[in-house]
Image (tube, rainbow, N blue to C red):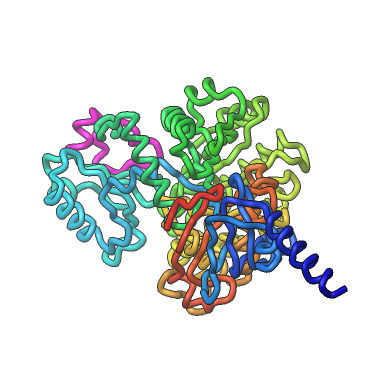
């Protein structure tokens, strides 16, 4: 009998091996956070035709699947997460920012000028463009700058410098004259008042813009991003993105929001999708930024009692845009930073949404929210979309602007509790493109120098699990895509990243040193 059983067993074993399913990619012996509903972990998965087909133990995957492409992470500290999703970013602006003089981190007006002079010596530009200055970082004079030093340093060459928040622009006299604008005596233009300066900036062909976008895409992949929401894109940029999607060059999943231009709203009369490009949202503004005192407050600024900020969009125009979005089936995302801006946006949303719903309209930033308005997020099912690094960039001077109202600011935990979930992003290029910095800021509420030592208002911080969800499955939920991405589960897009350490368990001091080893989108390796 033994002589019969042994050959039979061998035959069955060989037959079993022969019936393994052939797939495009297998990952084994890994530390995998699936970020599914139970926040379960796994050791391995199989990918075929761009999707996860099985997730589980290494033994299970090896028993049922085979591939010519196997990634074995045995004896490695590497960890796998679903691809990160930045819920508020500016893709084309990131590409353009890479072409400008970087003024971030300058500690004085003088240092800013030195950087511009050095760049001019190296590149001999006919129009100098810079971005990222922040007077709050200057150690000598933190008042809003005027153009007088620029005029001295560059009397003949036009210079146009965008503030870090993109809500203020500083231009010298040469630029103002060339643009045919009236000299306001300071060269400082708030919100859209300096739009005419765009007439003298370099012009790019469609192919050049496409290349600019593709450069930004590579920057995203290197940071571990596989999806983003790109806010306020122009019609031209959207058509170029669509073309890139047609020819397969757009590999990043882009959830694009229209700028509220007539051209956009006439061209897109219904939500549109083309492979990895989704156009189904409208971006609106209620106010400016806190750093430039453009955020709209219910009461005057504590350090500037003559102003409450800037109301960017009037009620009639704002309401008309909401009605257009409602009628055409678009989501709305409104920039609202000050407590007055948040109140206006929430109340006018409520007029249309009525009560609880599944429209997934959003408030972007929601930085200062009066306690009387906090429950409106839950009442009207409005999503607060927040950027944790804004908090850690602003925390050392925000109290000067707000006084006691600082207790109403950057309250991520309270906002999350209204719906039970919250998406996060960076607002790049205003902040760094890195989602690792988003994770660190959300959990530890400290800047890159690990200050303040005790963290900033830690009762409003998020846990590591909440933050990882905010960057993956909850981010997917914003764009109605929670069933197709955001977690490592069978049937979902095989978007995942491999890092050199486990940000869910390593010490606080190790997180900012985390490196992205590989990024995959739809099972394709897009960064290594």
Q: Is residue 336 above or below residue 277?
A: below
The structure residue drawn at horizontal position 22% and vertical position 47%, both measured from the top left corner, is: 147
183 within the magenta span: yes
In the image shown, does 463 or 32 lie closer to the viewer? 32
* Front-most of residues 66 and 390: 66
Q: Is residue 285 left or right of residue 122?
A: right
Residue 164 can be seen in this image: yes
- Residue 478: x and y in percent read 64, 46
Q: Nearer the viewer, residue 38 or 262?
A: 38
**Vertical relation: 267 (above or below) 154:** above
- The image position of residue 196, as x and y in percent, is 31, 31
Residue 31: x and y, percent?
60, 70
Tally of marks: 0
Location of the C terminus by quadrant is: bottom left
Asked if one can make out residue 337 in the rendered structure from this viewpoint, the answer is: no
Q: Which residues are magenta?
A: 174-196
- Residue 1 covered by magenta stretch: no
* Residue drawn at point x = 33 percent, y = 36 percent: 194
> Position of 269 compared to 259: left or right?
right
Residue at (67%, 66%) from the top-left corner?
A: 42
Q: Measured along the vertical axis of the image, is residue 462 above or below residue 479?
A: below
Image coordinates of residue 10 in percent, x first then y, are 74, 67
Q: What residue lies at 72% left-to-right and 55% top-to-bottom? A: 418
Asked if 111 appears above or below 200 in the picture, the reply is below
């Amino acid at each position: 009998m033994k002589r019969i059983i042994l050959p039979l067993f061998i035959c069955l074993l060989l037959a079993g091996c022969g019936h393994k399913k052939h797939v495009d990619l297998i990952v084994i012996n890994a530390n995998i956070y699936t970020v599914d509903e139970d926040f379960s972990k796994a050791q391995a998965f199989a990918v075929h035709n761009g999707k996860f087909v099985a997730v589980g133990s290494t033994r299970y995957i090896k028993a049922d699947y085979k591939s010519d492409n196997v990634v074995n992470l045995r004896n490695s500290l590497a960890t796998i997460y679903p691809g990160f999703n930045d819920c508020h970013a500016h893709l084309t602006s990131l590409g353009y920012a890479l072409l400008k003089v970087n003024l971030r981190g300058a500690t004085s007006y003088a240092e800013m000028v030195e950087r511009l002079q050095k760049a001019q010596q190296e590149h001999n530009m006919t129009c100098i463009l810079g971005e990222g200055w922040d007077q709050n970082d200057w150690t000598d004079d933190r008042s809003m700058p005027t153009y007088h030093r620029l005029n001295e340093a560059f009397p003949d060459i036009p210079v146009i410098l965008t503030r870090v928040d993109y809500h203020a622009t500083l231009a010298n006299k040469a630029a103002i004259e060339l643009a045919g604008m009236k000299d306001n005596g300071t060269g400082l233009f708030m919100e859209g008042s300096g739009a005419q300066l765009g007439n003298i900036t370099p012009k790019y062909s469609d192919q050049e813009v496409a290349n600019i976008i593709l450069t930004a895409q590579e920057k995203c992949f290197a940071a571990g991003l596989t999806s983003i929401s790109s806010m306020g894109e122009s019609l031209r940029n959207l058509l170029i993105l669509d073309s890139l999607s047609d020819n397969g060059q757009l590999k990043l999943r882009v959830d694009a929001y229209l700028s509220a231009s007539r051209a956009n709203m006439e061209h897109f009369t219904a939500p549109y999708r083309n492979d990895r490009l989704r156009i189904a949202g409208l971006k609106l503004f209620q106010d400016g930024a806190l750093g430039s005192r453009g955020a709209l407050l219910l009461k005057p600024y504590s350090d500037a009692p003559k102003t409450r900020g800037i109301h960017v969009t009037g009620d009639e125009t704002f309401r008309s845009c909401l009605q257009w979005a409602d009628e055409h089936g678009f989501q709305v995302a409104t920039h609202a930073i000050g407590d007055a801006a948040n109140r206006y946006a929430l109340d006018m949303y409520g007029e249309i949404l009525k009560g609880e719903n599944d429209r997934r309209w959003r408030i972007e930033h929601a930085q200062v929210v009066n306690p009387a308005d906090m429950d409106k997020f839950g009442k009207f099912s409005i999503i607060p979309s927040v950027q944790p690094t804004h908090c850690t960039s602003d925390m050392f001077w925000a109290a000067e602007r707000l006084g006691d109202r600082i207790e109403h600011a950057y309250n991520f935990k309270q906002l999350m509790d209204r719906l039970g979930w919250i998406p996060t992003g960076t607002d790049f290029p205003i902040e760094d493109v890195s989602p690792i910095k988003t994770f660190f800021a959300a959990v530890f509420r400290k800047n890159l120098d690990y200050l303040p030592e005790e963290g900033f208002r830690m009762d409003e911080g998020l846990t590591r699990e909440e933050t990882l969800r905010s960057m993956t499955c909850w981010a997917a939920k914003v764009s109605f895509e929670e069933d197709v991405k955001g977690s490592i589960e069978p049937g979902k897009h095989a978007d995942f990243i491999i890092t050199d350490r486990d940000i869910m368990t390593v010490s606080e001091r190790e997180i900012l040193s985390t490196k992205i080893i590989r990024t995959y989108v739809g099972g394709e390796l897009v960064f290594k």
